[in-house]
Amino acid sequence: MSTPTPALLVRGADVLDVAAGEYLEGTDVLAVDGRIAEVGRGLTAPEGARVLDAAGRRVLPGLVDGHVHVTAATADLAALPTWAPSYVAAHVGRLMGAMLARGFTTVRDTGGADFGMARAQAEGLISGPRLVFGGKALSQTGGHGDVRGPGQSASEEPGCCVSMGRVVDGVEALRIAARDQLRTGAHHLKVMAGGGVSSPTDRIDSTQYSLDELRAVVEEAEAANRYVAAHAYTARSVNRALEVGIRSIEHGNLIDDRSVELLREKQAFLVPTLVTYWALKEEGMDHGLPRDSWEKVDAVLGAGLGALERAARGGVRIVYGSDLLGGMQRHQSREFAIRSEVQSPLEVLRSATTVAAELVGMVGEVGVVAPGAHADLVVVDADPLADVRVLADPERHVRTVVQAGRVVVDRD
């Protein structure tokens, strides 16, 4: 049985109301049993409560990263299935602990994480963000989730080992695979709807899966009251995914005006991951990325900021994402600085709080400091509404992280 969480009173902070875009000055936050009980001035600490003096500091909701891979301990994704699952699990604990230390109290894994990892975090067996997972991403033969090189022919058996994707072809086979992922408790499904950087045999500008195959996955997700995310870069691959009902587009570096129209019309989400292309170009090969994949980065690197600006200007719901692999995961918070080049600080903050909460189906539970929400708080010593780039340097500016009412990081 887990130990009950003592009450926590965070006193005298400037608390960010993300929806209003302003601070509640000199405000207290009371957490009881892992949830926020009250937000206001002059609150009384219950007997036995821990009191955290946050006067002169800002309190934000716990941050949400909408695109991570907690099993990606290396950028050589073809090598990952050869690792012992127990060894990968040790890396998962390390990577998730580092995410939490940066202020990310909830993350959505878009390929690789499973029920066991989510349960281990929920039960306190590992320290890390609350884990919203989708299992293995579904990929066609030769698609972005197929890590075999052109000289290989053997394929892995589903469920045999740790990997970020699962190769499945055909409508009926996809229905079975989708149902199998949902059986494990997946919060969403993911399909590879276009080419990628880390995959060895596809082109960035390819479309992947037929429309009938994509529709089959969407139908299975909707039947289970879940949704589908799609890896896609080009306008062609993004638009066909949106047309069949896919709810979340991952990356989208090469979208066009029609993509923006469809994202709005379908009430879908865009999850840009700009930091990963910078990191892959700068140091990808140092962390195991094959040269052939490294050479594909240029096709999407330069277009990312323009796509983000186009989407933001068009009123698209945009979610924070990082998508980093291996040792590059330490750059997770740099996405704040990159996005600040084309978005306001409040827009970037909302992408990592309230908008992300919409995507993961946790409105009112994460991404806000309000009664009833999980008591996830980030205490900072600077003003991210004035300059969101302060969050890009968490070791300097993130002083305290609270998750479910517990102080999990304290740099004071």
Image (cartoon, helix red, strand yellow):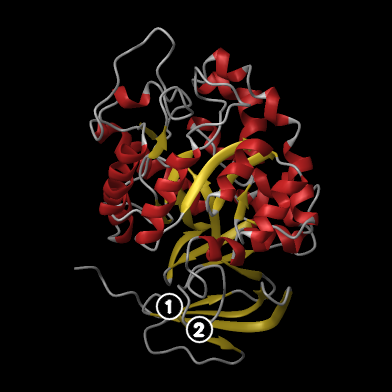
Q: Is residue 215 visible?
A: yes
* Label 1 vs 2, first from the N-terminus: 1
From the image, tell me which residue sits under label 1. Answer: 35
Quarter location, residue 146: top left
Judging from the image, what secondary structure is the residue with disc 1 in?
strand
* Quadrant where the image shows the C terminus: bottom right
Looking at the picture, tell me which residue is in the foreground, 231 or 37.
231
Quarter location, residue 284: top right
Quarter location, residue 29: bottom right
Tag 2: Cα neighbours inside 10 Å, few (<14), some, or many (≥20)?
Answer: some
Side of 172 where 131 appears, left or right: right
Side of 235 where 362 appears, left or right: left
From the image, tell me which residue sits under label 2. Answer: 371
At label 2, which amino acid type do we have?
Answer: Pro
Whether pointer 1 and pointer 2 mark residues with C-beta atoms closer than 8 Å, the reply is yes
Residue sticking out furthest to the top: 151
Residue sticking out furthest to the left: 1
